[in-house]
Image (cartoon, helix red, strand yellow):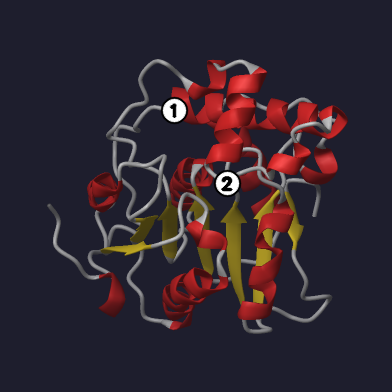
Amino acid sequence: MSNWLTRVGGGDRPFRRRLVALPHAGGWPSAFNPWRDLLPDDVELLVAQLPGHGARIAEEPLRRVEPMVEGLVGELSETDDLPLAVLGHSFGSVLGYELSRALEAGGRPPRLLVVSARQPPCFRDVAPFAHRRGDEELLEHLVRIGGLPARLREQRGLIGPVLRAVRADLEAMETHRRPGSETGVPILAVGAHDDPVVVTERMPLWSLETTSGFRSELFEGGHFFLYSPRTAVRVLGHVLKALSVDSLPAAGAGTASGELQGARP
C-alpha cells in the first residue's frame, strides 16, 4: 500500500470486510482514529490521505476531484476484493460519490455509500466561493464551524499548510459537477439539524443520485456531528449491516434490503 490510503489500527490480522473513510476538507486520517474501537476486528478501516494532508503535508495538494479519485482507485485495485463500504464527510462526500462510481465502473461496487454533511451534486455551488476567501476570513470560518480550535490561530507555521489543504479541497468540491448518470450503489445520507454550513432539507435529495436503495437520517452536533461516538455508532450500524448481507443485489439491480429502502421525492 502506498500513500493514498492509510490503515487505522488492526495490525496484520486478516480482514473480511473493508470501510474506506474520506475526511472533510483539509482533514487528516486521524479524524477517524476513534472509529477503530467501534469496529469489529474483521473490518479493515482505510482512511484517505491526500497530497498535502497528514504524512503527505509537504506535497502540493490537488485541486480537482478526478485525480484524487484516480489515486484512490489505483491503490484500492492493489488490495483484496473484500466487501466494501465507502463513507465521506462534507468534502469527503463528493469524493466518496465519485470514488463509488469509479469502483462500480471497474466491477467492484461498494455495498453502501454513506454521504455526510454535504448537499447532493444536483445543487451546484455558486459564488462567492469559499476557496477564494482570504486566509483570515477562511480561518475565521473554520473556527466558527468547529473545524479548527481557536488556540491554533496564532501558530502560523502549522496553520499555513492546513489552510492550503483546506483551500484546495474546497476548490475541488466547489468545481465538481454532477455526473451524467446516477450510481447503482445504495446511499445513506446523514446530516445534522444544527449544521451551520449545509441546508439540511437538501440531504434527502441524495436519493436522486442512486438507482438503488436510499435512506436519510438527521442528528445533532453541528457540521462535524459525524465524529461524535454516539453518531458514529448509529452510522456504523448501517455500514456493518450492509457488509454482513451476502445477498445484496449487484449495483444497479434494484433496491437494497431492509434499512435502505425508502421512497424517492
- For disc 2, the marked residue is 146
Q: CA distance from mark 2 to mark 1?
A: 24 Å
Identify whether 86 is placed above or below 257.
above
Whether residue 84 is visible: yes
Disc on res. 46: none
Percent position of residue 54, x then y: 79, 45
**Identity of the amino acid at label 1?**
His
What is the quadrant of residue 242 in the picture? bottom left
**Residue 184 picture location, percent across and down:** 32, 55
Question: Which residue bears the numbered disc 1?
Answer: 176
Pointer 2 or 1: first along the chain = 2
The structure residue drawn at horizontal position 55% and vertical position 66%, both measured from the top left corner, is: 228
Horizontal side of 162 relative to 174 (left or right) equals right
Q: Within 10 Å of the Cα at label 1, are there few (<14), some (14-19), or many (20+) other Cα atoms?
A: some
Task: Give SS at disc 2.
Answer: loop
Disc 2 residue type?
Gly
**Left or right: residue 234 compared with residue 178:** right
- The image shows residue 188 at horizontal and vertical percentages of 36, 61
Question: Is residue 42 toward the left or the right of residue 211 in the image?
Answer: right
Residue 76 drawn above or below residue 119: below
Residue 86 appears in the rendering: no
The front one of 224 and 79 is 224
Whole-percent x and y of residue 132? 55, 15
Q: Quadrant of the N terminus?
A: bottom right
Mark nearer the viewer, 2 or 1: 2
Residue at 51% across / 40% down in the picture? 91
